[in-house]
Amino acid sequence: MIDFLVEHDGVDKCVLIGSMSEDQRMQLAAYFASLPHEPFEQDIDPARVAAGEALHQARCERCHTENGTEPLDDAAILAGQSIGYLERQLINFRSGDRWQPRMMSRQTDDLSEDEILSLAHFYASVRR
């Protein structure tokens, strides 16, 4: 499967995935699932981590259990993700540029920029 991805380097991955058969998508998912998790290395602000942890406990823990590390949750693994990616997606959720479940929108719609950045730092700091 990795050969397939290398052969299509430079191709829009959304278009590529859309052109794959169900069997190819399953093989791709199995390949990535077999890889060990390696958190993204980045500079973390301890004060933001503390503020983000409090926000996580109050707003997010119900669905993103164990600080966003649990792969069996019906939610994304947030732990160890890039601060920039997490921040961008939370902004997209809040603005409506990215779909989110209604229950999640109740938790994200009123987040300030500062709260979003704190949540991003918290999740980025978490190791599985």
Image (cartoon, rainbow, N blue to C red):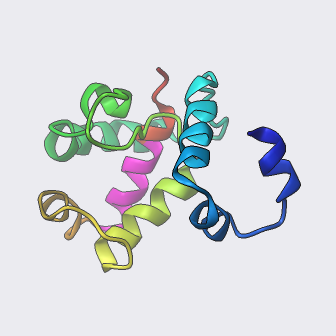
**Residue lying at 67% horizontally and 35% vertically, measured from the top left:** 41
Query: Going 85% across and 49% down the picture, which residue do you hit?
Result: 6
Location of the N terminus by quadrant is top right
Q: Is residue 24 above or below residue 68?
A: below
> Between residues 18 and 107, which one lies in front from this camera angle?
18
Give x and y (percent) for residue 128: 47, 20
In this rendering, the answer to whether 91 lies above or below 28 is below
- Indicate the quadrant where residue 96 lies: bottom left
Q: Which residues are magenta?
A: 112-121
Percent of width and height locating residue 120: 44, 49
Q: Is residue 72 left or right of residue 21?
A: left
For this orientation, the residue located farthest to the right is: 7
What residue lies at 57% left-to-right and 57% top-to-bottom?
Answer: 84
115 or 94: nearer the viewer = 94
Please say whether residue 117 is one of the residues in the magenta stretch: yes
Give the mark count: 0
User: Does the magenta segment cover residue 66?
Assistant: no
Main SS type for the magenta part?
Answer: helix
Residue sitting nearer the eye, 56 or 76 = 76
Residue 8: % across, % down: 82, 59
